[in-house]
Amino acid sequence: MRPRALLPLLLLTVLGVAALGACGSDSDSPGATTEPVVVKVTISGGEITTSPSDDVEVALGQDVSLEITSDVADEVHVHSSPEQEHEFTAGSTTLDLGSFSVPGQVDVEAHDLDADLVTLVLE
């Protein structure tokens, strides 16, 4: 084959490889997640139970929600930057804290109970 005849074949090969590479996305990469972290908090008789645990690992950019079941109304303080405050009533409440972009630890506490609910470990 002549060199000029190989040029279209080479061009098609390069374009095909480029097109296959564009099929992937960031969501296919290991560790990437779109599922929010849901922390379940139960407050009853002044006792606090948190699930999954007291320290919860959260990926940067991942949304966090608190599902609170409580026998009293209170206010949640989220010691992030900027800080957040969310009121909840007795009964069941879901609080969306959004996502976080700075690594570190964020303490979440019940204000009136003066008690820690959970520590978010942002990685």
Image: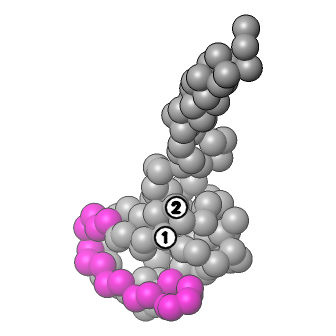
Q: Quadrant of the N terminus?
A: top right
Q: Which amino acid, mark 1?
A: Ser
Residues rendered magenta in the picture: 78-94
The extreme top residue here reads 1
Q: Nearer the viewer, residue 26 or 101?
A: 26
Q: Quadrant of residue 5?
A: top right
Give the side of residue 104 with respect to residue 100, left or right.
right
Could you tell me which residue is drawn at 46 percent across and 77 percent down?
Answer: 46
Q: Quadrant of the C terminus?
A: bottom right
- Which mark, residue 62? 2
For residue 50, above or below residue 111: above
Give the side of residue 65 with respect to residue 25, left or right.
left
Q: Which amino acid, mark 2?
A: Gln
Residue 41 showing in the rendered view? no
Could you tell me which residue is drawn at 36 percent across and 84 percent down?
Answer: 86
The residue at which mark 1 appears reads as 99
The mark nearer the N terminus, 1 or 2, is 2
